[in-house]
């Protein structure tokens, strides 16, 4: 493959950045929440409300916007402000393709979080992951709308995530 036409040349680095950044944060938070739920379930007499489906739904209804902001905040504007833009594109590559890859990798990180969290819930409660089709569709549409807005505003301002946060509230 010719070097100038390699649209996936930055993909391994982008994947590493997303895994070490938002992905690691989501994993750590999932572990902490599962440990807290495990302790609560040991103390509570009626864990009937603490089903994995209920917990997954409540958790992602509460934190989905923040997850999208963490995954995509400052994507373009951070590169422009840090001066990385010139280094990234010193070899010919479409800028839209580079940032689309980064945006899609953020979506992968956000959509993998319920699976990781569900794995922890299965360990804690032993009765399933709590993942439903409606939950995954809600997360995907939420990412499309929230992270897409952040991505668009990132072209114009460094406070893209803040604007989307205030608009969504």
Image (spheres, grey):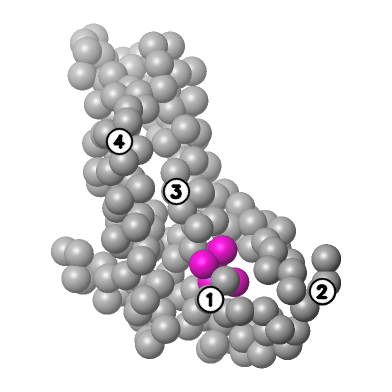
Residue 135 image position (x, y, % from top left):
30, 35
Residue at position x 16%, y 64% from top? 169
Cα–Cα span, label 1 and label 2: 18 Å
Quarter-of-image position of residue 92:
bottom right
Q: Is residue 37 magenta?
A: no
Contact, mark 2 vs mark 3 (Cβ under 8 Å): no
Contact, mark 3 vs mark 4 (Cβ under 8 Å): no
Contact, mark 1 vs mark 4 (Cβ under 8 Å): no
SS at mark 1 in the image = helix
Residue 83 image position (x, y, % from top left):
62, 89
Contact, mark 1 vs mark 3 (Cβ under 8 Å): no
Residue indicated by mark 2: 3
The label shown at residue 33 is none
Residue indicated by mark 4: 135
Answer with mark 1 or mark 2, whichever residue precedes in sequence: 2
Q: Which residues are magenta?
A: 98-102
Q: Nearer the viewer, residue 5 or 165?
A: 5
Cα–Cα span, label 1 and label 3: 21 Å
Cα–Cα span, label 1 and label 4: 29 Å
Residue indicated by mark 3: 110
Q: How many marks?
A: 4
SS at mark 3 in the image = helix
Residue indicated by mark 1: 96
């Amino acid at each position: 493959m010719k070097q100038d036409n390699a649209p996936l040349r930055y993909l391994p680095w982008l994947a590493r950045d997303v895994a070490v950044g938002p992905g690691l944060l989501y994993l750590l938070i999932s572990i902490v929440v599962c440990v807290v739920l495990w302790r609560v379930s040991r103390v509570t007499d009626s864990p009937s409300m603490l089903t994995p489906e209920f917990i997954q739904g409540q958790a992602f209804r509460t934190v989905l916007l923040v997850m999208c902001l963490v995954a995509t905040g400052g994507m373009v504007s951070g590169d422009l402000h840090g001066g990385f833009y010139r280094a990234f594109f010193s070899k010919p590559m479409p800028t839209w393709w580079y940032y689309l890859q980064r945006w899609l990798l953020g979506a992968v990180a956000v959509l993998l979080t319920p699976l990781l969290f569900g794995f922890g819930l299965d360990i804690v409660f032993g009765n399933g992951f709590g993942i439903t089709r409606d939950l995954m569709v809600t997360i995907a549409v939420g990412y499309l709308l929230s992270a897409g807005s952040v991505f668009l505003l990132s072209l114009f301002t460094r406070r893209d995530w803040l604007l989307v946060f205030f608009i969504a509230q």
